[in-house]
Image (spheres, rainbow, N blue to C red):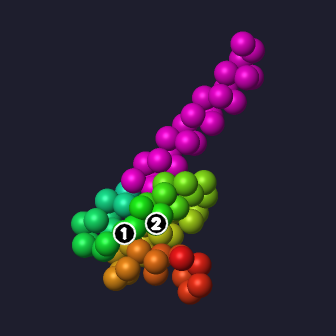
Amino acid sequence: MSLMAQEKYEYQRLYMRTLREKASSVLRTLETQGVPMSDEIRERILGCRDTIILDRWLVEAFHVRSAEELFGPGQA
């Protein structure tokens, strides 16, 4: 495998790990706040591939009463 391909693979692996960690942080925060979540909501959070959105959800997770509020009006 070429060095360039190895670097690309490593970058992708690290990016995916970062996404999983951020999504897990959102879920843990919601759980700690006592916010109920459906399996569909959990999957949506775990399936998110945008670090900016995950960061926003993490901040908002401290202030919502329902997990659906993370997604904004009409997006749950």
Count of marks, rendered view: 2
Q: Horizontal placement of 6 versus 52: left or right?
A: right
Residue 7 lies in the magenta stretch = yes
Predominant SS along the magenta part: helix
Tag 1 secondary structure: loop
- Front residue of this view, candidates 40 and 17: 40
Position of residue 11 measured from the top left corner of the image (x, y, whole percent): 62, 34
Q: Residues within 10 Å of mark 2 (few under 14, many from 20)?
A: some
Question: Which residue position holds label 2?
Answer: 41
Position of residue 45 measured from the top left corner of the image (x, y, whole percent): 49, 61
The amino acid sitting under disc 1 is Met
Q: Quadrant of residue 12?
A: top right
Q: Write down the region rendered in magenta.
A: 1-24
Q: Quadrant of residue 2?
A: top right
User: For the point 67% across and 21% down, which residue is it?
Assistant: 6
CA gap, disc 2 and disc 1:
6 Å
Q: Residues within 10 Å of mark 1 (few under 14, many from 20)?
A: some
User: For the point 50% across and 70% down, which residue is it?
Assistant: 56
Circles 2 and 1: CB distance less than 8 Å?
yes
Question: Which residue position holds label 1?
Answer: 37
Task: Tell me the quarter of the image containing the C terminus.
Answer: bottom right
Position of residue 62 measured from the top left corner of the image (x, y, whole percent): 34, 75
- Front residue of this view, candidates 11 and 42: 42
The amino acid sitting under disc 2 is Ile
Task: From this view, report whether residue 55 is shown above or below residue 13.
Answer: below
Task: Tell me the quarter of the image containing the N terminus.
Answer: top right
Task: From this view, report whether residue 69 is shown above or below residue 13.
Answer: below
